[in-house]
Amino acid sequence: MENASKALIIAGAILLAILIIALGVYIFNQAKSTTNVDELTNQQVQAHNNTFFNYEGSINGTQAKALIDEIRNNNQSMPDLGDIAVTSNVQTMANEKDNTQLANLKNAFQTTSKYTVTITGYQTTEGQYKGYVTNITINK
């Protein structure tokens, strides 16, 4: 009888130890996921901006037209971010964010010409879209 009593105490102690270890692992994972939120946000910003970084530098007219399509898609799909403004010396635009104006600019690019793309602005206000591209300059 005495051995059975000791066996139950030992089994209880083992179960209690397993419970404490499981609780420690759970708390560790919760704390780890909290720190990964900032890292995930940085990855999302980088992934979004890479779309536009690929066009930065010297490009031809076909690539410039593709860039305008990317900007128009971005402006339509991410209204919370605010539109990406385009400045260009190829065509004077009254409103550099307006999709009609962007379509006109796209048509003004000649496929055989060379253009220089520069990213000139990023979202600086705190919040969900901090660091996202907001201004792009395309010059001949």
Image: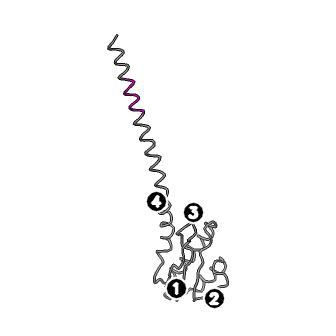
The residue positioned 55% from the left and 71% from the top of the image is: 124
**Residues under numbered marks 1 and 2 in contact, where contact means CB atoms less than 8 Å apart:** no
**Residues under numbered marks 4 and 2 in contact, where contact means CB atoms less than 8 Å apart:** no
Q: Is label 1 or label 2 in front?
A: 2
Distance in Å between CA atoms under marks 4 and 3:
13 Å
Whichever of labels 4 and 3 marks the residue nearer the N terminus, that label is: 4
The residue positioned 60% from the left and 78% from the top of the image is: 85
Residue assigned mark 1: 111
Q: Amino acid at mark 1?
A: Thr
Residue 92 numbered tag = 2
Q: Nearer the viewer, residue 95 or 62?
A: 95
Is residue 17 located in the magenta-colored stretch of the structure? yes
Element assignment for label 4: helix
Whichever of labels 4 and 2 marks the residue nearer the N terminus, that label is: 4
**Residues under numbered marks 1 and 4 in contact, where contact means CB atoms less than 8 Å apart:** no
Residue assigned mark 3: 128
Principal secondary structure, stretch drawn in magenta: helix
Distance in Å between CA atoms under marks 2 and 3:
32 Å
Residue assigned mark 4: 39
Whichever of labels 1 and 4 marks the residue nearer the N terminus, that label is: 4
The mark total stands at: 4
Q: Amino acid at mark 4?
A: Glu
Q: Which residues are magenta?
A: 11-19
Q: Residue 13: give x, y in percent of width and height.
A: 38, 26
Distance in Å between CA atoms under marks 1 and 4:
39 Å
In the picture, measured across the screen, residue 35 lies left or right of residue 101, that is: left
Q: Nearer the viewer, residue 54 or 46?
A: 46
